Every structure is written in structure tokens, then in C-alpha cells.
Image: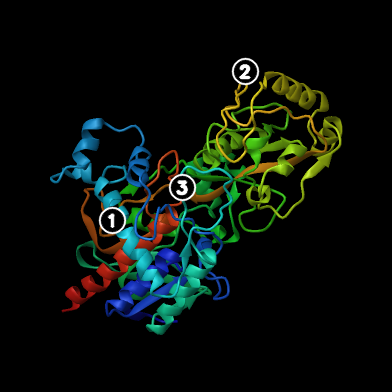
Amino acid sequence: MGNQEFDVVVAGCGVAGLSAAVAAAQAGGRAAVLERSTQEERGGQSRYTEAYLRMKSHTEVTDDFETHLAENGSGSVDPELVEEAAASHRSALAKALSIADPALIERFAADAGETIAWLQGMGVRFEFLPTQFLTKSQPRLLPVGGGRALVEALAARAEQLGVQFFYETAAIGLEQGAGGRVIGLKVRRRGTQSVLSGEVVLACGGFEGNAEMMTRYVGPRSVYLRPVCKGGYYNRGEGIAMALEAGAAACGDFGSYHAEPVDPRSGIAEPSVFIFPYGILVNLDGRRFTDEAPGTVDAHYERVTRRIYEQREGTAWVVLDARHLRIPNYRLGIRTDKPPVVGQSLTELAGKIGVPAEALEATVREYNAACGPGEWSPLQLDGLATRRLVPPKSNWATPLQEAPFHAYPIISSNVFTFGGLKIDPSARVLDGDGEPIPGLFAAGEIVGLYYGNYTGATSVLKGMVFGRIAGTLAAAERKRVVA
């Protein structure tokens, strides 16, 4: 491949990287994109996602957008430092603090609408389509055709603008010049190494595809996790590692990830099982362990899924009776391509799913006895809660007694890791003193923003918004440097 020179070199071909490449080319820069996969599989996780966007219209984010991000934007941090991080004049300590920068959140929200309009200009259509959430607290805007439509539209525009693609090529290190300025990427293709010179945008995802990093940061039980789709296996964390080695500040919860409930029997992308609020969740010992329905499924599925991950072998079964089959459009909440395990009795079902029959029967008997009277309203919070049951069930608590009984296995998938790099509102990677590392930008999942509880339907949007910002500024910076 040989050493080559560009204005902007982008690592990653998902929506973040492609947005950066298109924006750089539109700003007059010569851009290159590195993609670890083949051209046919390009797009990483973006290719497989439905790409939910937390927006109440084509131009405005939801009312809770900034608040939710801020409330889930740090761990336990000195409150005075949090206040200082929001001030106009900040110390180096505050600027490099591992929290979601208030100014970054503000820029994210402000630029979302114009980013959607930018993509519409490439032919992408956005609609408020049905989602997999039978109950929801916030609207979701979707690109028609999902993430794949975004990838193909952006890639087509990049090709029209002359962006050069390097497939089956991995970024392995940063090339730095005088004063630590990043001047290019060291890359590897089929055993051959070379350097692509230019401003660098890291948009190569998290580390969900790297078993060593998952064990180091998330813990040894991460063997019970798996990426939510095949694209996640390409995300091996090299971008994070090379930036940290160059002095970048870390941000985001490195010990956590975005959890989604999936069927471990399935090999399709995102084989989610969101029907669990209408039954009970039992572990491999046949016992309940969490409130299955604390609120709308869109706002609470992650917390419930984390409780599943805590169980033996990271596995649970949702047990439902025939009543769930009468929920309007119930199939929207079941994305797995595998059929349910069916039993005409709880004893038969227990035998088929491999949990102790006596334990399952006792669990269901105790649960049924705790269910009270009231009207079951499956498409809205109905407040039908159990009485004197530990753990409780807060909504849709009706007895499981109508055969046939159905069960689906559920594990926690790893949609993406939370730990990554700290950037400023201009997508420049910051160093340990809170100052931009010259020549280095980042966008997408590699940017650390989330702690504890994911703000749903923001990750794809984050990639597009800051990818566009990064590409535009990187091209302008290149012109300034070479002038």
C-alpha cells in the first residue's frame, strides 16, 4: 500500500467515520477512510442497527435529552469540580475530568437537527416508525432502512466526493511529529505496515470485540457477554489504546457497556427479546430476581438486562402464559428468529428449559398469589403491581395460568462499551491537562460519554453529529497547518 498523504485520515467506516469523511471532503479536504472489514461488510455496528434517534421532530431532540445525558454523565465526582467543569474558565483538572462535559452535551443537542437535514440532503428519509418497544416514554425518529441506509448513503456521497477507502486495513498507531502533534496513522493491511499522513479522526468504536480489554475493564464475567451484532467483533479498542498512550484523557465508564436483552440461541443481528414485562424472569435455578416491569420498557430494559447478567451463567428465562399472544402487535417485542420453548404445563416447560420443575412451580405459585385484581392494559403503564412479593413486579402483574406456556432464554448483549476518549465540543481529543492534542479528533463510540445508565437512542446520533464536526474542523485545521 505504501505511505500516502491526505488532508484527513479517518479510522472507522461506521456512521461516525463516514460522516467525518464526507464533511472533510465537503470542506475541500482529501480524505481517506480505513475499514477493517471487506467492502461488502463495511459499516461496523452501524450497518446492523435500526439507528433509533432520540428526537421529537426532525429538527429537535427530546425534552429530556440534555437532562438525561447530564444525570448519567459521571460517576461519583466532587460536586465543586462538576460545577467548575460547567464554568467558562476552568482549571486543567476540571477540563480533563472524567465526566460528560456540559458544553459537549449542549453542542450535541444543538447540532442534531442540522445533522438530520444534512443527511436528508443525501437522500436519507427519516420517519417515526414502529419500534420494538411496546411501551415507551420518549419518541424515536428512525432512518428508513435503518443503519444500513445511513452507511450506504454516506459511503456513496464519500465516493462521489473522491474519498479513498482502504478496506481490510487496521489502524495500529498514531504517527506523531514535533511537539506531539499527530501527523498520521500507522496502518496494517495483510501483514504490511505503512503510514497515511494527515489530520486523524478516530471513529473506530469501543472494545466489545476485544476479550482482553473486556476482561480488564468490565471483568472476568464478561465471558457471558457478546457483541449485539457481528459488526461489534471488529471493534477491538486499538483507537482508544493508541490515544491513551499519546496522553489522551479518558472519559466514560470503562467498567460498563450498553446492555440489551437478546436470545443466545440466535445468530442474527440484535435478536432482542423485549416481551419480558408481561411475564416473569427466572434464573437457572427457577427463581425470580428482579422487577420485570418497573416502567416503560424503553426506559428500563437496560437496568433489567444488567440484573440478568448478574445471574448464574449470565442467563435467565422469561416465562409467559398464552395471554401475551393477545397483546396487539406483540411480535414487535420479539426480534429473535428462534421459536419459543412451549409447554402445556409448567412441569413440561421446566423440563424443556432445564430449570428445576418444583422451583419453577413454586415461583409461579408465589407470584400468582401476589397478583391482585385490576384491568390489564399491556400497551400502557397499568399500575397492576404485586402485593408483598420480593422482588415486586410494578406493572402488568397478572397470574400466569393460561396454557400453553412460552419461554425465551435471555442473556445480556454488549451493544457498545462506555469507556473511551474525552473530546471538546469541536470533537478534538483532549490530553490529561484538558488541552486539545494537535491533529487528533474523535467521534462515535470511541468517545466516552455514558456512565451507568445509557441515554437511549443517542449513540448513532452522537456519531453522526460529532463525525460531521470532526471532519469539518480537521479539514480546516489541515489547511491552516500547510498554509
Tag 2's secondary structure?
Answer: loop
- Amino acid bearing label 1: Ala
Of the 4 image quadrants, the one containing the N terminus is bottom left
Count of numbered labels shown in the rendering: 3
Quickly name the residue at label 3: 456
The amino acid type found where label 2 is placed reads Arg
Residue lying at 26% horizontally and 55% vertically, measured from the top left: 425
Q: Pointer 2: what residue? A: 387
Quadrant of residue 279 within the rendered picture:
top right
* Number of other residues with Cα within 10 Å of mark 1, as a class: few under 14, some 14 to 19, many 20 or more: some
- The x, y position of residue 161, in whole percent, is 37, 83
Q: Amino acid at mark 3?
A: Gly
Determine the CA span between mark 3 and mark 1.
18 Å
The residue under the point 71% across, 40% down is: 324
Q: Secondary structure at mark 3?
A: loop
Residue mark closest to the camera, 3 vs 2: 2
Residue drawn at point x = 68 percent, y = 28 percent: 398
Q: Which mark, residue 180?
A: none
Give the mark, 3 or 2, whose residue is nearer the N terminus.
2
In this figure, which colouring scheme has been used for the structure?
rainbow
Q: Nearer the viewer, residue 18 or 249?
A: 18
Residue 407 placement (x, y as % from top left): 75, 40
- Outermost residue on the left side: it is 89
Q: Which mark is residue 110?
A: 1
Q: Is residue 471 above or below residue 442?
A: below
